[in-house]
Amino acid sequence: MFSGDLLHFPQGFIWGAATSAYQIEGAWDEDGKGPSIWDAFCRLPGRIRDGSSGEIAADHYHRWEEDIAIMAELGLQAYRFSISWPRVMPTGKQKINPAGLDFYERLVDRLLSHNIEPYITLYHWDLPLALQEQGGWPNRDTAFYFADYAAAVAARLGDRVTCWITHNEPFVVAVVGYITGELAPGIQDPVAGFRAIHHLLLSHGLAVEALRASAARQLKVGIALNLNPVHPATERETDQLAATRFDGVLNRMFLDPLFFARYPEDIEELLGPVFPRIQEGDLTRISVPIDFLGVNYYTRSVVRYDESFPIIQARQIQPEGSEYSQMWEIYPPGLYELLLRLWADYKPTNIFITENGVPVPDGLDADGRVRDERRIRYLSRHLAQAHRAIAAGVPLRGYFVWSLLDNFEWALGYTMRFGLVYVDYQTQKRIIKESGWWYAQVIQENAVPAIEEE
């Protein structure tokens, strides 16, 4: 048990952990599954830091029973996972692969038998390759195929699964997949990228309608956005303008249409001919009411004016004197700031932190334990900020650690470990880290140890 003062969370607060299909499942071509854009992207030379892929990953497709037993041992109350679209619909449309839905049905039933609530994400970046060959997310048709896919999954699982997330981080899908090209499908085309943003949001609205129409009972539906507070690097007017633009593309470009049925005027004016074509009724569909907003928070964005960057003329920098993980600045107060901003500006009915975590270069000690104190410190500090936000009136209902398992970290391959559970990729042995046992105690106490406010 924890000692000392505790920060207690409200009764009924949900404690969970999250994963995604391509990052943990493996079995990339088994039982009728079709290829995804990530299967193709990983084969391109130089795209993945360690030359790896998600073909095996954490082999969850074969080890799901063991993984659910670990969840139960940790006392997880909820598990957020994604459905692989090409596992359910190998070409992304029309023909359903029964074996794919069977896998997720077994997963859901076993979770429920352990009183672990499934939170399904329908899209976590693994677009069926066949749809990319027809244009991918810049193709408007993809939005309607996505709604058909959502309906098919809900028809099978909607009688048991209450909580659904349409998309994970559409900003990353569109901007990093279609503009910078650092992630699948690896395209560098601003026009395609901003079209992808609009079609992802349109597909969200269509999927919300499809989910609610297809299930036999009332569902709770939301979307998970990667959101950062954006700070100017200095008080110079140029840096402040750069920060406003950066915030517009990262945050308001998604939040405004979802909650206000409009895109930010300053960003529409800034983009000019690059701005996506919008058809009548699109924004009404995008802004269909949702039951909750999922927030993926890792860091803040500190931005400096840089005219060499096209369109927004803004560059993210790493402030001196800050603490850093292997990937980002560690900035816990940003979570409090972000949650208060969301509540003040957008008033979502319910908020969940759907991802929060940190990569740590974990390894086994001589006694076979993984002592990841740095992850415990990261999670503790961020949960303290979440507690502050609840005390300030934010309707934060739950928290999902990223991630349950060490996994394939996209373009970084297996060089980053985010898990509460260590995975030996050679043997696929699972070992619960010290952070996992710490989180189990958080769940049991419904509290975290009090720390000094930053």
Image: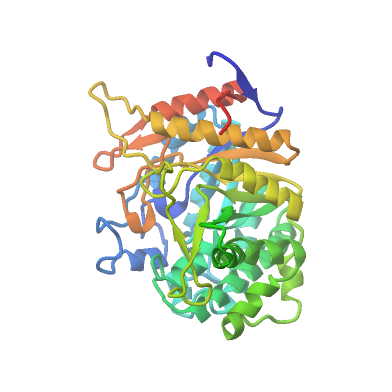
Question: Residue 249's x, y, as percent?
Answer: 58, 67
Question: Residue 448's x, y, as percent?
Answer: 57, 25
Q: Is residue 195 left or right of residue 32?
A: right
Vertical relation: 99 (above or below) 45: above
Q: Is residue 172 left or right of residue 427?
A: right
Vertical relation: 280 (above or below) 416: below
- Residue at image position (41%, 61%) is 32
**Can residue 32 be seen by looking at this rendering?**
yes
**Can residue 226 be seen by looking at this rendering?**
no
Question: Residue 72's x, y, as percent?
Answer: 51, 29
Vertical relation: 119 (above or below) 67: below
Quadrant in the rendering for residue 389: top right
* Picture quarter with the C terminus: top right
Q: Residue furthest front?
A: 236
- Residue at image position (73%, 41%) is 395
**Camera-side residue of 439 and 27:** 439
- Residue at image position (71%, 29%) is 10
Question: Residue 20's x, y, as percent?
Answer: 47, 50
